[in-house]
Image (cartoon, helix red, strand yellow):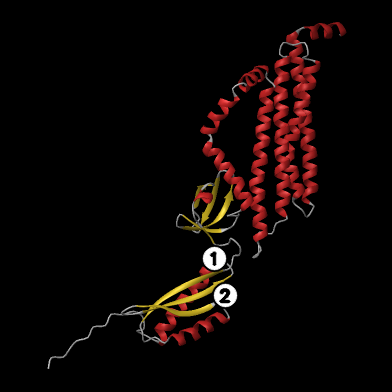
Amino acid sequence: MKEWLEHTMKNENYRLLIGLVLFLLSVLVLTLVHRFITHHLKARALKTATKVDDVIIDLLKVPILWIGVGILVNLFNETILKESKYANFISDINTIFLIITVGWLLIKGVRLIFYILRQRLDIQSENNLVARQNLTRMKIFEGIIVGLITFLIVAICLMTFEKVRALGVSLLTSAGIAGIIVGLAAQKSIGAVLAGIQIAITQPIRIDDVVVVEGEWGRIEEITLTYVVVKIWDERRLVLPVTYFMEKPFQNWTRSTSTILGTVFLYVDYSLPVEALRNKLTELLQTHPKWDRRVANIQVTDTKQNYKELRVLLSGMNSSVNWDLRVDIREKLIDYINSEYPGSFVRTRLETLDNK
């Protein structure tokens, strides 16, 4: 038996076959153990009040398994396949595999840290300005860190090859020319990234800000290093380059506070008494849940040949609430005028002269 085993191990094909079978069995055992431990940890995590432990398990379970497989590959390569002609190739591939896995683990760790930090922000409250500022910074800097880790991992993987290293040294001698060419070619891309970093620091816009861009009213839904997504009121998405918000004017209705003034215009006959309408407005707003009790007024803002223009000024805690308040008050004032002062809206008078 001993002689047969020694003879078998000297044969490269048999040794590779045995090594492959043992490796697959080891991976199977590792996968079963990993699944058992993960299932056990998930069951315990479900019993806790916080969701952080659930997120940790979901983020780290796959990278940890990959690291375990990489260690097994290295172990079998250094023992059973050490004298094989494929040993160096498998070693290089496994090194790249482990580097990518570690990079993935780092990225998962970064996302986990930012997830925990985001859980401490209360975005749903009415006075959420500071929370939205911090959320915007987190979103952008998370993208920057993930991008840097990805770049470093790719660079390290390429440097594992001798030919690539030699190519890098030769290119280094012409770095000045290459830098100019790359700089000109990637000018807009670099400008977009720098604009994204600038937005993270200066914050002309933030997550959930109410803005008017390109004639559309909406909220900032997503901010990345290169583009911004605006969720328009009718559920459409307007995607704009991040440089747009650094180069073009736009309206930000929640820059420092979410409170806002809204207007309702009425065009009525000169015979309508404005003071009666003011009293009715006060009556309507006393019990209205959407009025924040700051501003409510009616003024005659213009006069024309056939009518006068009334501006109803109303305040609200935010633009959405103010919109609902304005449409409701507009409806009730129109009904009141039609009921109490019929015929008081704009009309064209025709007079006939009797022939004598």
Residue lying at 53% horizontally and 34% vertically, measured from the top left: 186
Question: Does residue 265 appear to the left or right of 84 in the view shown?
Answer: left
Q: Secondary structure at mark 1?
A: helix
Residue lying at 57% horizontally and 67% vertically, measured from the top left: 318
Q: Secondary structure at mark 2?
A: loop
**Amino acid under disc 2:** Trp
Residue lying at 81% horizontally and 47% vertically, measured from the top left: 44
Residue sitting nearer the eye, 10 or 241: 241
Query: Which numbered tag is attached to residue 158?
Result: none
Residue 137 location in percent, x, y? 65, 50
Question: Does residue 13 appear to the left or right of 194 in the view shown?
Answer: right
Quadrant containing the C terminus in the rendered view = bottom left
How many labels, in total?
2
Residue 129 location in percent, x, y? 64, 60
Q: Residue furthest right?
A: 2
Quadrant containing the N terminus in the rendered view = top right
* 234 relative to 264, above or below: above
Query: Which numbered tag is attached to residue 320?
Result: 1
Q: Quadrant of residue 291?
A: bottom right
The answer for how far apart the CA atoms under marks 1 and 2 are is 12 Å
What residue is pinned by disc 2?
Answer: 291
Residue 265 location in percent, x, y? 43, 74
Residue 353 location in percent, x, y? 17, 88
Q: Residue furthest bottom?
A: 356
Work out whether mark 1 precedes mark 2 in sequence or the reverse, and give the earlier one: 2
Q: Quadrant of residue 306?
A: bottom left
Q: Do labels 1 and 2 touch, CB within 8 Å? A: no
Residue sitting nearer the eye, 242 or 68: 242
**Amino acid under disc 1:** Ser
* 85 relative to 324, above or below: above
Are there few (<14), some (14-19), or many (20+) residues within 10 Å of tag 1? Answer: some
Question: Does residue 44 appear to the left or right of 216 in the view shown?
Answer: right
